[in-house]
Amino acid sequence: MKIKYSLFTRRQFLNGLLGGWLGAFFGSILYPVLKFVYPPYREPEKVVLPFADYSGMGLNSVQIFSWGSKPGILKKNQDESYTAFVGVCTHLDCNITYISEQRKFFCACHEGWYNENGVNIAGPPPRPLRRLIVEITGEDLIIKKEGVE
Amino acid sequence: MRKKNYLILLLLFVVILLFLFAGLSLAQQVEQTNPGQNTQIQQQKDSEKIFASFKNIKEETGTYVFLAWMWLSIAVLIWILRLKIKEAERLYHLKFFSPPKK
Amino acid sequence: MDRRKMSIRVWFDERLGLSNIVRFLTEKSVPQHKYSFWYYTGSAILLFFIIQVVTGFMLICYYKPTLDGANESVARIITEVPLGWVIRSVHSWSATFMIAFAFIHLFGIWIVKSYQRSRELTWMTGFFLLIISLLFGFTGYLLPWDELSLSATKVGTDIPRSIPVVGAWVTKLLRGGEDVTSDTITRFFGIHVSILPVLLFILLAIHVYLIQRHGMSVPLSEERKDKEVKTLPFWPNFVFREMIVWLILAGILFSVALFFPPSLDKKADLMAPAPEGVKPEWYFLFLFQTLKIFPAKILFIYGDTIAVFVILLAGVLIFFLPLIDNKPGEKKGRAITFLAYLTLLYALLMTIWSLL
């Protein structure tokens, strides 16, 4: 369909082309800049620790290990089994603590409570604590994300 | 500018660039294969040097694509700017920008 | 649509008065003659400085200016951070290009004698800008804290010591003590990212203001011609041409930076002996060689002291060049132009000699 008049002048077209291409040029430079400034946060797939450091745990007690840059909580349960959680509150990422007398995890920032299985029971936390899988093979204590070989 | 002059300028620019790259890569080569440098200390130091390089093939190809896109953009932008310069010159000779004479 | 845009422009203009600046830029004229391309050298320096600031901001995100952290953080930037080596390479090469163009600009102005009559202060502020650029390069060179940069800094900060009376004081101020230590790296980092940028902005503002006030100068040989010098309006004609120059320079910079990234030597050891082949960055090589050719002692004065004095004297003479060159058209003026070529040749020869 041919229109009788031009939608824009030659000057507008040229200016638009210049501005647009300059924008694309700087946009393409912006991408590497952003990639540099936002480094990818790499969470470890699994963590291998010497079991000897954790063998002396009493029942119903916890010990902290490093899960990337976050704390991980290794808990020895009443039935001598081990559970591992990512030790940050699901509300706003504060580090949580375990109160063994009450058998509850507590987040001091906004008074969030989790039971001994990590399920959120009181306060603002919206979800239970993230679980990690624990494996003990000989001298190694392997803690890994769910679904990792 | 006449087409011939423009082509000569472009050719000159490419030649200078090639010289620059050739000179730099030659300097790199000389530095790496210079016999005076192959003392034990120097070899040890070279092995402790950290060289900047691409981490994977995706990064490498991405960089070459970016370079090609960059030079293409520069060529297009220069073409557009030359058109705008011609227009600005034309308007200047018409005294379009001067204040109106009373 | 246009009317709406117009009212936004009017809104800002009522409050900021920017239309005065825009009108000034359209009325400012740039002479067109055989040597016009030299006019591009000044803004080229600005382009590279802007690139330095942007890449510098990015590098600051990861660099740690401490004894333990410096080398490791640079290694991390090169190996772990995505495209870190590219940003570091651009920063390093842009420094080279900026200082190269600063020298080209200086020699261009010297040979064409743009510093005459009322433009003396422009030259003097420009001279300080060059010194600041060299200091940027010097302080930045230490920051990766690898063997070569530590040795170069030790030598560089030792040179002022040969000046009698104040020398030792200057060295102690630069180093933060008698020796190069972790205090030196912190001090150099502070100088590199805050003191020097502030000084540069102030001097650059004065320099640019003076250029606008006095206009672009025309070489004597062109002025002597009978016909009137053709001019171009700064905006938009000259600015579009400048954009083209900037695009090409930026393209060359990125291409060189991507193909020839700098490496990182191993971490500096304060107790280790000086490595072989210690030399400063290329822009100091001619000074380095000048120091080397002086004998250890002349009569009863240390060779170093005399060398430093000679260099300082040369610096002072160059600083006062507009006042010295008061008869540009005559023999004295021609001799000073010849001196420019001689200085350039000397610097080039000394640089090449130091590399052999």
Image (cartoon, coloured by chain):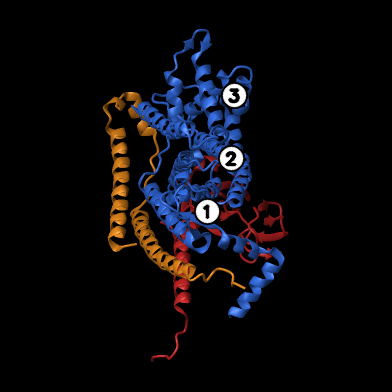
Chain colours: A red, B orange, C blue
Q: Residue A50 location in percent, x, y?
A: 49, 41
Left or right, A112 with reference to C204: right
Answer above or below: position of A133 versus B31.
below
Q: If you read the primary sequence from the N terminus, does the residue marked by circle 3 or circle 2 appear first?
A: 2
Type of amino acid under label 1: Val
Q: Seen from this angle, which residue lies furthest top?
A: C299
Answer above or below: position of C323 versus A59.
above
Category of crowding for the residue at label 1, using alpha-carbon neighbours closer than 10 angstroms: few (below 14), some (14–19), many (at least 20): some
Front residue of C125 and C62:
C125
Q: What is the chain letter for disc 1?
A: A
Category of crowding for the residue at label 3, using alpha-carbon neighbours closer than 10 angstroms: few (below 14), some (14–19), many (at least 20): many
Q: What is the chain letter for disc 2?
A: C
Query: Pointer 2 and pointer 1: residues touching (CB < 8 Å)?
Result: no
Picture residue at 62% right of the left edge, 63% below the top: A119
Circle 1 — which element? helix
Name the residue carrying label 3: C171
- Whole-number angstrom distance, CA of label 1 to CA of label 3: 36 Å
Q: Residue C291 location in percent, x, y?
A: 46, 21
Name the residue carrying label 1: A37
Circle 2 — which element? helix
| Tag of residue C120 | 2
Q: Residue C135 location in percent, x, y?
A: 54, 35
Asked whether residue B72 appears in the rendered view, the answer is: yes
- Whole-number angstrom distance, CA of label 2 to CA of label 1: 43 Å
Type of amino acid under label 3: Thr
Q: Residue B11 location in percent, x, y?
A: 28, 54
Q: Which of labels 1 and 3 is toward the front? A: 3
Of the 4 image quadrants, the one containing the C terminus of chain C is top left
